[in-house]
Amino acid sequence: RRPSASSRAAPPLLAAVVAMAAAALVSAMVFGVPTGVWVYRRAVYYLGKEEQLRVERLTETVVFNGPCVKVLNPLTVKSAKIVNAECLGQLDYIVVKDTVSGKERVERGPQLLYLGP
């Protein structure tokens, strides 16, 4: 039996990585190697278990929690920064203040705390 077309399709992440690699290769051939490297470095992010990616897009800020691989469109991203999550022990706590609304909340440990945008 031949596998169906859906079972032969590449996973979305793999397809996105291949597309970005192809874009980097094409831009390297057209504009030179530094441009291809720039596209790859600005588009692909590898996050560890205790890391978070904060992405400032044109109109919003979004966060992605690790572990994962994120492929971004470099033309729609103002900035992207990898930050570490806060590791709270058994007796630790932290007061988190929302800068937009001014509300405060208390996060108690033990937990791995990812802060929002």
Image (tube, helix red, strand yellow):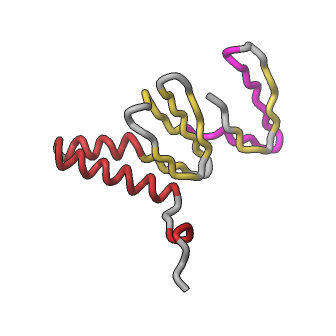
Residue 87 in percent (x, y) is at 69, 42
Q: Is residue 59 magenta?
A: no
- Looking at the picture, tell me which residue is in the foreground, 3 or 112: 3
Please state, as top left, top right, bottom left or bottom right, where the N terminus lies in the image. Answer: bottom right
Q: Measured along the vertical axis of the image, is residue 70 above or below residue 8? A: above
Name the quadrant containing residue 95.
Answer: top right
- Looking at the picture, tell me which residue is in the foreground, 72 or 90: 72
Q: Measured along the vertical axis of the image, is residue 97 above or below residue 39? A: above
Residue 101 in percent (x, y) is at 73, 14
Q: Magenta residues, as a range?
A: 83-100
Name the quadrant containing residue 31.
Answer: top left
Q: Measured along the vertical axis of the image, is residue 58 above or below residue 30? A: above
**Which residue is depicted at the point 76% across and 30% down?**
94
Q: Measured along the vertical axis of the image, is residue 88 above or below residue 117? A: below
- Compared across the picture, whether 23 is left or right of 63 comes to left
**Which residue is depicted at the point 67% across and 38% down?**
114
**Which residue is depicted at the point 49% across and 64% down?**
10
